[in-house]
Amino acid sequence: MKFDDVQKIFYKYIHRRYHRFCRELFAQLLCLNLNIKSAYLFDLFPYSIEDMRNLLNNLSSYLPFRSIILKYSINDLIIMNSSQLLKLIDDTSTSVLVIDLNTMTTTNCHPMLDEIRNHLSWINYRQHEQIDFDNETNEEWSHLIQSLNHTTIFGYLLGYPLIYFYSSNSLMDVMTLKNFRLSVKIKDLNYETLLYSFSCPIHEKIDQQQIELFVNQWFSSLSLTMNESDMIEHYHLDQHIREQATWCL
């Protein structure tokens, strides 16, 4: 499948001023369909949850994955492949390392992970009644997400191997970070697509060798899925040191 096959659909449901973003959105949705990503945090341009649902419905003949849209705030719209839900709920299928910014320690058994999995179990149960969850129109959903650490849950939903947890204001904006970026080249697109971007603080309490090993294991596992698709021409994982930079998920 090429972007040309679906271009008319994108151009019909997206305002012309944002047409320059359509190929990027196509690439991200394609990776959801290929199960290379579990979810995508959409932030390319202003777009309502209703408009996104209309777009996805009209793309379903080309991108047939069953999607769930989760709206956590006006700027936080997550598109999720529902087939990934059970995998994310099962603690034996999803391996993540939590970086606790309060103590500058790492663990794969943080209590917050149970909260996230309970949250996803609730979504999984309710998805048979509704497929989209809007914090502005769904009072139960709005109440449910108020107590969640959105930084942590977004990292988990997006499939990052490293996710942050904090209970108060952190000093991440003045710390040196190691940023990991996974880019893929999709057929028919003239540029690479940034698929994953996550970071880790460089701190004396954080074992950088453990971080490297964990990320490499995650990358090796993901590579098996990417190698199965003839839509992926190549991919690579890069590292960058960001001195006292604003952190990213």
Image: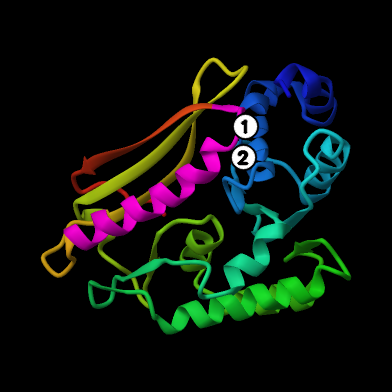
Callout 1 secondary element: helix
Q: Amino acid at mark 2?
A: Cys
Decide whether the magenta segment is chiefly helix, strand or loop.
helix
How many C-alpha atoms fall within 10 Å of the one at disc 1: few (<14), some, or many (≥20)?
many
**Marks 2 & 1, CB-CB < 8 Å contact:** yes
Q: Which residue is mark 2?
A: 31
Give residue 1's quadrant in the image. top right
Q: Which residue is mark 1?
A: 27
Q: Is residue 107 left or right of residue 141?
A: left
Is 196 placed left or right of 35 in the picture?
Answer: left
- Asked whether residue 224 is drawn in magenta, I would say yes
Looking at the picture, the colour scheme in use is rainbow
- Picture residue at 78% right of the left edge, 76% below the top: 125
Q: Position of residue 196 (x, y in %)?
A: 46, 44
Give residue 105's position: percent from left, percent from top: 24, 74
Does residue 202 show up magenta in the picture? Answer: no
Residue at screen point 42% across, 66% down: 96
> Residue 110, relative to residue 46: is it above or below?
below
* Towards the viewer: 41 or 87: 87
Residue at image position (39%, 80%) is 109
Residue 70 is at least partly visible in this image: no
Residue shown at 59% from the left, 19% from the top: 189
Task: Please state if 66 lies on the left or on the right of 157 as rendered.
Answer: right
Relative to 13, does residue 8 appear above or below in the rendering? above
How much space separates mark 2 and mark 1, taking CA atoms?
6 Å
Magenta-drawn segment = 209-232
Q: In the image, what residue type sits under mark 1?
A: Ala
